[in-house]
Amino acid sequence: MRNAKVFGNRTAFREKDLGIWQSWTWSEVSDEIRAFSIGLKTLGLEPGDKIAIVGSNRPRLYWSMVAAQAIGAVPVPVYADSVAEEMAYVLGHAEVKFAAVQDQEQVDKLLSMTDEVTSLKHIVYDEPRGLRDYDHTHLHDFDSVGDLGREQLSKSASLAAEWEQGFAESKGSDIAVMLYTSGTTGRPKGVMLSFDNLVISARNANVFDHLNETEEVLAYLPMAWIGDHVFSLAQAFTAGYCVNCPEGMDTIDVDRREIAPTYFFAPPRVFENMLTMIMVRMEDAGKTKRSMFNYFMDLARNVGEKILNGEDVGLKNRLLYKLGEFCVYGPLKNRMGLTRMKVGYTAGEAIGPEIFQFYRALGLNLKQLYGQTEASVYITLQPDGEIFGDTVGKPAPDVELKIADSGEVMYRSPGVFVGYFKNDEATEKTKTADGWVHTGDAGIIAENGHLKIIDRAKDVGKLNDGALFAPKYIENKLKFFPNIKEAVAFGHERDMVAVFINIDLTAVGSWAERNNVNYASYQELAANPDVYAMIESHVDQVNRDLSKEPMMAGAQVRRFLILHKELDADDGELTRTQKVRRSFIAERYDPLIEALYDGSTSKHVKTEVTFEDGRKGAIEATVEIRDMNSYEAGKGFQEAAE
């Protein structure tokens, strides 16, 4: 309501539909939310009821959340790509009464689970295509619900004021949203966040990075993820900036170039994929272009970040860097849609230092943050001028940080969640009586006050010879190479480190085309001897790098294999936010792990896979296992030079 009065004619939302960007001002958004909110109330949505939000990023789904909040109901965003079993658990556990969904696919999915989710009474859909002949007794078009609200408003002159009075009397401690964790260690938990949690955290973040109503963001991350909820809703509403919804997942790259967001967030995987595409394109480029790219990227690595940080750089290098901006850096940023980026963040997983440096060397103000759903995102942030690739910043505004005796990172802030829904036991384990939250991550606070995350506390271990084993650190080094999409390292309480690797089908497929290598599937390409040789060279380079690091030299990779299938969230191997579920993978692929450690050179394996509609299938293959050289501590660089 504030934005409608102050920024009434400014664009609040855009959505690309059939190749055309449709826009709504804050005044129009206010009218849409009011009508839809009153329509929901007329249908029977009451304070305290839960409403599921299911679908891709769409303005109407964001408005549905706010419309529900205005009458005291609690939105529960759900991962749209969840298989039916996962979605049924969340909806049933949350006791949802209403659902606002994108299209026929989501309607069908919800209708198929009505026997399991008995609390669900009404479904509202955005896109009507394919739904005309459905029974509409409890099924409603978004427009019809809005029209119902407008009809009620026309009948009562005081209804609009009563509606506003209703949420004006609500409290900051009221539950604003319920977001389910990605479930890396078991069933997802419903994280209850209050209005104070979200509003205070969002305002602090806007002030920290000087964000205002002029910003543009691209809303493409899962709506069920805390990052999208804060960046595309809480911060957008508190700052008044514009949220842009792409046409679909396959048009994101094009849509990002058209919008050129000024505030951009992406998990490391997105930045890794963009870098992979760049490197693949450069492999296909002519000799002159490749030479120019390599020359100016070498220059950027030496001086780009220094210029970005405002440090002293010689006149010659500054002039060369400007030439590089014209010839290489500018076109690269334009290709990625980041030409106007004022500030960008990555979080969720550790990003490889080399990948991080690549983007900052281009002059992009990419920073890292450390956060959790339970913190309303923000725990630490990197202040401008204090950007380090191996740390995640200092405590965010109003956040207290400490390292427990066990080495676990703990925090306390206004963003700390209210609790887990229907799970007091888990709440008490996570949040202390005086408000400190256990993160589950091991870390240290450096002398400069910055937090360095080592790994998940439960994942950090030791080899049998006492050497430190930090799997994520090793995996991120491997994933720097564009040909490697995912890696899972093993070694705790074992004699050596061994690794599963997923190749990147885009990068390796491009290599195969350039080298006339025929393949019919991921499985066939993964088993190709030349692909194995390529990955072996990458693992060897990682071992050389690890040998130069005193703490990690003992954790060099001794054996590896390339998995016969891609790790997939539908198979339970990744979370919906693409985090590796280590314990599940260790159990699922136990025969392969055993083969890595018993000296086998190959292992036949059959793996069950699950399709999105719940059907089962199987992939069968004989997986090759390769041994690797290791290097004496401190000798990797010397041997590489020789």
Image (cartoon, helix red, strand yellow):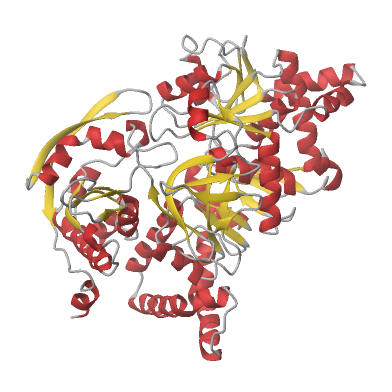
Q: Please report the residue visible at 72 percent of the width from the left and 43 percent of the height from the top.
A: 237
Q: Nearer the viewer, residue 26 or 498?
A: 498
Query: Residue 335: percent from the left, percent from the top?
Result: 50, 62
Q: Quadrant of the C terminus?
A: bottom left
Residue 103 placed where, x, y %?
55, 27
Q: Residue furthest right?
A: 157
User: Is residue 63 placed above or below 90 in the rendered structure?
Assistant: below
Whether residue 246 is visible, yes or no, is no
Please identify the quadrant where the N terminus is shown. Answer: top right
| Residue in front for this viewpoint, 410 or 303 | 410
Q: Quadrant of residue 23?
A: top right
Residue 66 image position (x, y, % from top left): 70, 32
Residue 384 in view: yes
23 left or right of 135?
Answer: right
Task: Kindly identify the residue that appears in the image at 11 percent across and 42 percent down.
Answer: 595
* Whether residue 559 is situated above or below residue 421 in the rendered picture: below
Location of residue 615 by image quarter: top left
**Location of residue 625 with respect to 339 vertically, above or below:** above
User: Which residue is at the front of the view, 594 or 255?
Assistant: 594
Total label count?
A: 0
Vertical order, 285 against 1 (above or below)? below
Q: Position of residue 3 (x, y in %)?
A: 80, 43
The reply, left or right, for residue 16 in relation to residue 427 is right
Closest to the observer: 39 or 391? 391
Q: Which residue is depicted at the point 24% across and 33% down?
A: 587
